[in-house]
């Protein structure tokens, strides 16, 4: 696993991987390009590599600055007393060839280790759907809100807001491995 | 014109010598000030179309120092609007043509003639002499000069300073098309450059380049002192530069293209005012009321050397703190601390902070940092900060602890909630843009966008 910024030559591969599995604007947000550029510029981009190929990505966007999608959809202050101690885990993608085995857990474990050592972020929000919400719950997450509605430009989508703590995520992933 | 310089030097060298060996009394200095004030006002009224209009009502023959605060200000807007009409004489009588960098509007011309160039550089000669004597007591060294552009005075001024001190100088501007970073770093190493004149941001960028090229900045070079100018450098940033390079950083001078060298450092890294060349006033920045020649406020200067572009009661836009030190020698009597530019002030949750306050809060105790950037956002009707730091590969501390410490300090000092991030790829402009504007280079303000209104 590596952590890169938007200036990295690897970042284009991150964008490509996201585009392949998530599309360009999954929530159909307004003013998306500008918002997304700001989020990318103010986030950590964690990448999972197989030799030199990027096969997984996760964006870690700090909460408390009104930057992230979750802060548009939900009043996170109801759940996070000090939002700047937390981050939103978003744009999690794993190449389909690496799904179903240990890769996702390995990626999340390495991510947790790096975040514990290099940031002051200790709490996690994840606004997600279906399988991903179940995955986070399986790793110690707690569903704070079900049925979060987001009316995008074309259609309404529904999400679950999941809360995790970095320490328990780390312990749960390690335990599962 | 050379004849003018010879005549000027006869008078100037005598008082300069007395000023520096402390044989110039306060009364004699005041007499010099009054004589030069009358001379320079007469000079600009006669030679500058702008000042012929601007000071038409002023009779310089009866001016006293007490009348100074009755003269109209010269502002940055005046300089922009007047253009070449501000000059006191034809451009051909000058020896150098420089311009301001033009980040906040059109560039303005700043030519210099022999007299003002000579008088301005004398103070800097004294500063370089004192620092070099401190670090190279019985040795010779080479001075590296890294200046920003070809129409900036930096290279010529420091070249002249080194010539006057009989020092070898090397102009190694890394952004020159014939130099570049690899050659600049190789020259820095091969010439065993001991003193480097540059800007703090450039020194951070250079440390990053040096690391990328496989150097260890602390080990592979012979640097002992940085003579910095171009932007403010807080004690925290100086400490950080020492951690990166193992060289002591001095705020070598304070001035600008328009005003030349208003103050230069002594061996204790204090900026001492060049009172032979300027009448100094501190103003209330809002009302413009003169508060005298010391205290805190906006610096206003009247340039006393009757050259190509002396300015009368020029509002610098810089916030300063001037202290008079009784018992010190005449040349060391007044020190100035530059708090920052008025336009660089940042309001966070309705409280104003200077660039220096923000930088100090961010970098205090931080070592091995290659650059920083601050993103201002707004959430829940409160301003917030995302601070990004790029660290050296030689940083061996606890990253998690460092960012937590800075986060708490930003909350305590600036009253903001913050996220502090260690990143690997701050853009080059973050460090290099600081030659022109600290704020534009290092602050990304998202508060005014539609984003903040969500």
Image (cartoon, helix red, strand yellow):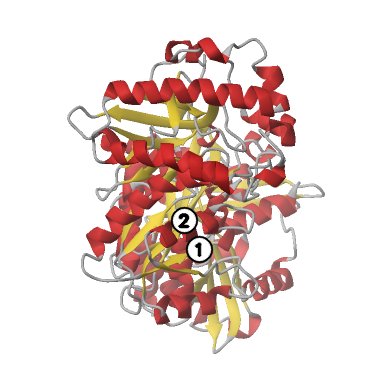
The answer to whether residue B63 is above or below residue B439 is: above
Residue B95 rendering spot, x and y as whole percentages: 62, 50
Q: Is label 1 in a helix, a strand or a loop?
A: loop
- Specify few, some or many for label 1: CA neighbours under 10 Å numbering under 14, 14-19, or 20 or more: many
**Mark 1 near mark 2, Cβ–Cβ under 8 Å?**
yes
Q: Tell me which chain the residue with mark 1 is part of.
A: B
Residue located farthest toward the bottom when viewing the structure as drawn:
A51
> In which quadrant of the rendered image does the N terminus of chain B lie?
top right
Residue B108 seen in the figure: yes
Q: Nearer the viewer, mark 1 or mark 2?
A: 1
How far is the residue under mark 1 from the one under mark 2?
Answer: 8 Å
Residue B62 rendering spot, x and y as whole percentages: 51, 10
- State the mark number for residue B146: 1
What is the tally of numbered marks visible in this picture? 2
Q: Earlier in the sequence, mark 1 or mark 2?
A: 1
Residue at figure coordinates x 73%, y 30% from the top left: B82
Residues B151 and B19: in front is B19
Residue located farthest toward the right when viewing the structure as drawn:
A154
């Amino acid at each position: 696993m590596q952590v890169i910024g938007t200036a990295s030559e690897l970042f284009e591969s991150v964008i490509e991987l996201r585009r392949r599995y998530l599309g360009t604007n999954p929530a159909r947000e307004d003013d998306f390009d500008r918002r997304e550029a700001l989020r990318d510029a103010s986030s950590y981009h964690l990448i999972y590599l197989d030799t030199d190929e990027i096969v997984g990505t996760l964006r870690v966007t700090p909460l408390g600055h009104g930057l992230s999608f979750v802060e548009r959809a939900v009043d996170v202050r109801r759940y996070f007393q000090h939002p700047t101690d937390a981050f939103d885990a978003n744009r999690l993608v794993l190449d389909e060839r690496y799904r179903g085995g240990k890769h996702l857990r390995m990626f999340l474990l390495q991510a947790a280790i790096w975040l514990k050592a290099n940031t002051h972020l200790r709490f996690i929000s994840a606004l997600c759907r279906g399988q991903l919400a179940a995955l986070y719950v399986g790793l110690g997450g707690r569903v704070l809100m079900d049925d979060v509605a987001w009316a995008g430009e074309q259609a309404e989508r529904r999400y679950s807001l999941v809360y995790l703590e970095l320490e328990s995520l780390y312990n749960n992933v390690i335990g599962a491995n | 014109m050379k004849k003018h310089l010879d005549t000027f030097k006869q008078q100037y060298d005598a008082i300069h010598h007395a000023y520096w060996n402390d044989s110039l009394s306060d009364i004699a200095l005041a007499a010099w000030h009054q004589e030069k004030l009358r001379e320079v006002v007469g000079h600009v009224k006669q030679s500058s179309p702008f000042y012929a209009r601007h000071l038409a009502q002023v009779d310089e023959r009866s001016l006293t120092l007490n009348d100074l605060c009755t003269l109209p200000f010269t502002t940055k807007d005046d300089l922009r609007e007047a253009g070449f009409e501000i000059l006191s004489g034809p451009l051909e009588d000058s020896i150098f043509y420089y311009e301001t960098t033009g980040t906040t509007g059109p560039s303005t011309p700043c030519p210099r003639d022999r007299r003002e160039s000579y008088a301005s550089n004398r103070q800097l000669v004294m500063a370089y002499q004192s620092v070099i004597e401190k670090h190279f007591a019985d040795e010779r060294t080479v001075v590296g000069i890294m200046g920003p552009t070809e129409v900036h005075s930096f290279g010529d001024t420091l070249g002249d300073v080194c010539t006057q001190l009989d020092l070898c100088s090397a102009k190694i501007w890394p952004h020159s098309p014939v130099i570049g970073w690899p050659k600049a770093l190789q020259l820095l190493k091969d010439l065993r450059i001991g003193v480097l004149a540059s800007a703090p941001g450039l020194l951070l960028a250079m440390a990053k380049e040096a690391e990328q090229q496989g150097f260890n900045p602390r080990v592979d070079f012979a640097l002992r002192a940085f003579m910095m100018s171009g932007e403010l450098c807080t004690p925290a940033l100086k400490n950080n530069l020492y951690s990166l390079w193992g060289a002591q950083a001095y705020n070598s001078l304070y001035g600008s293209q328009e005003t030349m060298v208003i103050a230069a450092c002594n061996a204790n890294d204090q900026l001492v005012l060049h009172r032979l060349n300027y009448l100094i006033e501190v103003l209330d920045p809002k009302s413009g009321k003169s508060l005298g020649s010391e205290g805190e406020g906006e610096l206003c200067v009247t340039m006393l050397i009757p050259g190509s572009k002396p300015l009368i009661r020029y509002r610098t836009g810089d916030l300063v703190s001037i202290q008079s030190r009784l018992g010190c020698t005449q040349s060391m009597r007044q020190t100035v601390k530059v708090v920052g530019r008025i336009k660089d002030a940042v309001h966070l949750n309705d409280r104003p902070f200077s660039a220096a306050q923000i930088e100090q809060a961010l970098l205090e105790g931080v070592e091995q940092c290659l650059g920083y950037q601050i993103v201002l956002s707004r959430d829940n009707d409160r301003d917030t900060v995302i601070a990004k730091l790029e660290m050296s590969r030689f940083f061996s501390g606890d990253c998690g602890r460092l960012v937590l410490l800075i986060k708490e300090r930003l909350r305590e000092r600036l009253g903001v909630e913050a996220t502090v991030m260690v990143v690997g790829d701050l853009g080059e402009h973050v460090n290099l843009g600081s030659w022109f504007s600290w704020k534009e280079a290092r602050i990304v303000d998202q508060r005014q966008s539609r984003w903040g209104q969500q």
